[in-house]
Amino acid sequence: MDASAQPSPSDAELVRRTLGGEREAFGELVRRHERVVGLLALQRVGCRALAEDVVQDSFLKAFVRLETLSDPSRFAPWLYGIAFRASVDALRRRQRETRRRAHSIDAVGEAGGPAEPATAQPSGFEAAWRGERDRLLLEALGRLEDPYRLVLTLRYYRHMRYREIAQHLGEPPGTVANRLHRAVAKLRALLAPRLEGRPER
């Protein structure tokens, strides 16, 4: 091991550097967390393009509000909370836009104009996630409560151990293990009837 190699700065250190005017420090925070934020957003909104918007919105809000973070060591869970809320906001905006478009199409049809069918176009998300099982898994993850979806993402997408997740979230390892156990049970309950071709109860 190179003795001159410097350890990676902690999130807390990068937060302090950012608040001190070092913009590149926030860029490192983005690189460090954008994959998890992107996965959480994609699981929630189910559309790659919309998830990318959520990621950008989340980091912009985090940068603007960074001074409000009382404990810099808890940057990660604070950021994930912002991403969860941004995902909900994005879904609401999409629903409003869908209703507005449907209303516009109806109005054109009533006026005697050529009303185009309101059929959804295939998204990039559909092409990126191959296979029915992957699609069902992502859909089921999106239906879990945020804390459960988060621990599953960190464990099985980031391949973190319990202690690493606990340190990342600032929670006891026992709490993380219990939450992960419940998350897996909830995910199985959602997936089992669908993978077996039976309707959910």
Image (spheres, rainbow, N blue to C red):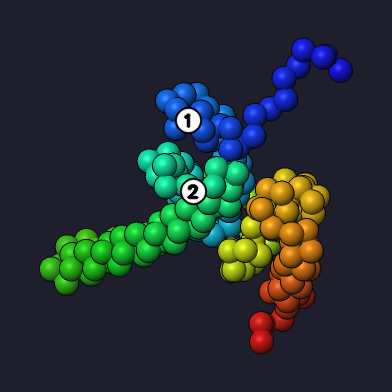
In the rendered image of this protein, does residue 191 appear above or below residue 163?
below
Q: Secondary structure at mark 2?
A: loop
- Nearer-the-camera pick, 72 or 107: 72
Q: Residue at x 73, y 53 (%)?
A: 166
Q: Residue at x 26, y 64 (%)?
A: 100
In the rendered image of this protein, does residue 4 appear above or below residue 182?
above
Q: Residue at x 45, y 58 (%)?
A: 85
Query: What kind of residue is marked 1?
Result: Thr
| CB under 8 Å between discs 1 and 2 | no
In the rendered image of this protein, does residue 146 appear above or below residue 163?
below
The N terminus - image quarter: top right
Mark 1 residue crowding within 10 angstroms, few (<14) / some (14–19) / many (20+): many
Residue picked out by circle 1: 18
Query: What kind of residue is marked 2?
Result: Ser
How many labels, in total? 2
- What is the x, y in percent for residue 20? 45, 27
- Nearer-the-camera pick, 12 or 155: 12
In the rendered image of this protein, does residue 25 appear above or below residue 47?
above
Question: Is 185 left or right of 57, judged from the image as shown?
Answer: right
Question: Is 98 left or right of 201, judged from the image as shown?
Answer: left
- What is the x, y in percent for residue 143? 59, 69
- What is the x, y in percent for residue 53? 43, 45
Q: Residue at x 47, y 53 (%)?
A: 82
Q: Residue furthest front?
A: 70
* Res. 43 image quadrant: bottom right
The C terminus - image quarter: bottom right
Disc marking residue 162: none
Residue picked out by circle 2: 70
Distance, label 1 to label 2, CA atoms, is: 14 Å
Q: Secondary structure at mark 1?
A: helix
The reply to whether residue 183 is in sight is yes
The reply to whether residue 49 is in sight is no
